[in-house]
Image: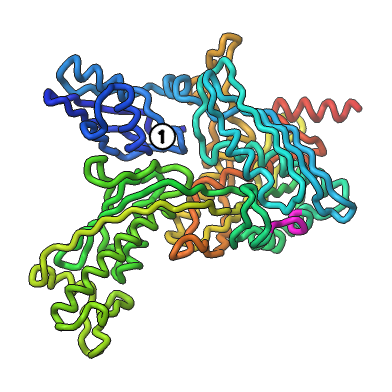
Amino acid sequence: GYIEPFAATAFWSPDDHLTIWASTQNAFGMRATASAILGLPESRIKVVQLEVGGGFGGKGTGYMEPVAALLSKKSAAPVKIVMTRKEVFEGTGPTSGTFMRCKIGVDNDGYIKAAHIYMAYEAGAYPGSPVGGGAFPALGAYKIDNILVDGYDVVVNKPKTQSYRAPGQPQSAHAVETVMDEIAEKLGMDPMELRLKNAVHEGDMSPTGLPHTRFGCQDVMDAMKAHPHYNAPLDGIYQGRGVAVGYRMHGGGNGSSATINVNGNGTINLITGSADLSGTRVALAMQAAEALGINAEDVNPSVADTDSIGFTSGSFGSRITFDTGRAVLNTATLVIEQMKERAALLWEVPADDVDFTDGVFICSLNTDDRLTFKEMAGEMTHTGGTITCSASDVQGGVGPQLAGNIVDVEVDPDTGKVEILRYTAFMDVGQVVHRSNVEGQMQGGVLQGAGWALNEEYYYTEDGTMANSSLLDYRMPTTTDLPMIDTVIIEVPNPRHPFGIRGVGESPIVPPLAAIANAIHDATGVRLTKLPMSPSSIVKALDEKNAQ
């Protein structure tokens, strides 16, 4: 559902330098791929990141860029290639189709004692499905002493699968969270009470084998159980309510770089290598402004090409506000240190005697000597020239996160149509940077998850050809398909970030599949385990139930 299809322009110059302009979310990865395919050193390849009209993980892979480059070399002219919608559908890969078997054992009090999940993920024609992404976090929200996960990467005669927002995790959450509801029903227990009873806490073992750091697992579940939506009455016979939570781990080990140029009027230019998919330029600018004690409006953020910034991993894994944010803060620290040295020159004191608080430089030996960031910037030409600083950051380890959904649906028993009546999304975001951007991420994840649950499906012929490769035949939800999605933001600071920030891009799509499935079961009494839960599948399930 990209607004913009895949597009790239390449120019192979006579001096054997290649420039690629692309709507990519992984410029340095594209440079490495082009180098390997074309036999050209990375130092001779420049990738210019353009605005990305929708990424969701799929635009982290290069497709036609090397082809455009070779055609440019042949023709001695720039070459542009833009995929058609049909080519995007058929050539760039869907997310994985999956098959799951999930068993969870509990005692009579509802405490989970053991769990076993068998999961098979389609990889397409070549190995490489997100089975690992589905396996690790599947049971992460719950404290379970005995876990066995069997994961399989399955090669099939279909196009190679591609990353799609929280790769592998919505599918495994769908399996686990529907089973959790089945357990609650058999025990006669409130579904949220069962989840809270088994929620992990700080120090409990995580799926990686390391203890959990502080995150809002119980906080999100508490908020869901106490929310008016959860306790509001339902009116209709075929109305139902479903809940689900989605646990996700944000991986470490990806590097980011940033540069700050200080201008004489106290504004700064913030340069990073991270493609902006979801408003991350604003989030990074706000972090820089906070660190330097200036207004966010005084920060001009931009995304540089691969020649103009240090190595930066792609915009994936909900990592930009967190990882690149840390690089920005490292750079801001260097700026402050240089400015302290400049202030020390003006006041003729050691730099150690200059403090920086709330955007003001203060001489500790004479507190009447003080300069704002803007005033200090105006002194640059008299104290050594322009200040330009660059820094990088590679954060190790992983950070957990929890999202949760409450959804009300009404099912038409004659047509099988599902109408979503009310939707409330919850998420632990660490520390909010830009509230409306966070709300938009939560609402967008719900919308995509609802499409996955109810409508969206790739149809293949016997020979592996996609049969519905157009926006007319591939039904995606629109704003008319859902009511206003309410959001509840939970703030539990992330200890791995100076400002307590967590990434928010992917977790919102993890719980909707299970939440909607549980709501349909509550409304109809039938348990659907195959996605999408289309009108025809609901009618068939109701007919089978009524025939018993």
Identify the residue at the far left of this view. 382
* Residue 246 seen in render: no
Count the labels in the image: 1
Residue nearer the viewer, 212 or 198? 212
Residue 431 appears in the picture as rendered = yes
Q: What element carries label 1?
A: helix
What amino acid is at disc 1? Answer: Gly
Q: In this view, does 335 lie to the left or right of 521?
A: left
Provide residue 446's location: percent of width, then percent of height.
57, 45
Q: Residue shown at 61%/48% (left/top)?
A: 208
Q: What stretch is highlighted in magenta?
A: 195-200
What residue appears at the point 60 percent right and 55 percent down from the top-left corner?
426
User: Which secondary structure dominates the residues rendered in magenta?
Assistant: helix
Residue 339, position as x, y percentages in the image:
21, 71
Q: Which residue lies furthest to the top in this view?
A: 463
Relative to 67, say whether 412 is above or below. below
Residue 230 colored magenta? Answer: no
The residue under label 1 is 60
